Amino acid sequence: MKCYICAKEGKEMDAVAICIVCGMGVCMDHLVREEMEVWKGDYPFPSKKLKKTIPRIVCQICYSAYKED
């Protein structure tokens, strides 16, 4: 699998990960690995934030949307 962002730029780079949000293959230059909050939602609501975080890999596009306020 090739990096989708590199391919759009006319480059050919192997993907090393898949974004957990959009499923895009990304190379080391276009991924973000970050500890993200985990929420547990049971019925009935409300959800609650768990104490520990989980390391996640996302593409730069989804990361910027996730961090947008």
Image (tube, rainbow, N blue to C red):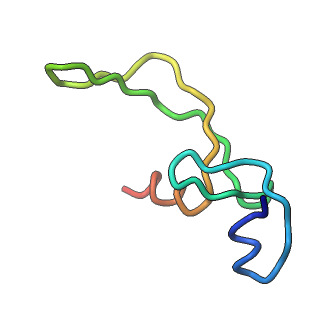
Image quarter in which the C terminus is found: bottom left
Q: Is residue 26 left or right of residue 43?
A: right
Residue found at x 84% / y 60%:
14
Towards the viewer: 1 or 31: 1
Q: Is residue 35 above or below residue 46?
A: below
Horizontal arrangement in the rendering, residue 41 relative to residue 27 (left or right): left
Residue at far left of view: 44
Q: Nearer the viewer, residue 45 or 50?
A: 45
Position in image of residue 39 (x %, y %)? 37, 27
Give whichever of 67, 47 is nearer the camera.
47
Residue occupying the far top of the picture: 51
Q: Residue at x 51, y 49 (%)?
A: 21
Q: Residue at x 24, y 19 (%)?
A: 42
Residue 17, position in %: x, y? 73, 48
Q: In this view, does 25 lie to the left or right of 1?
A: left
The N terminus sits in image quarter? bottom right
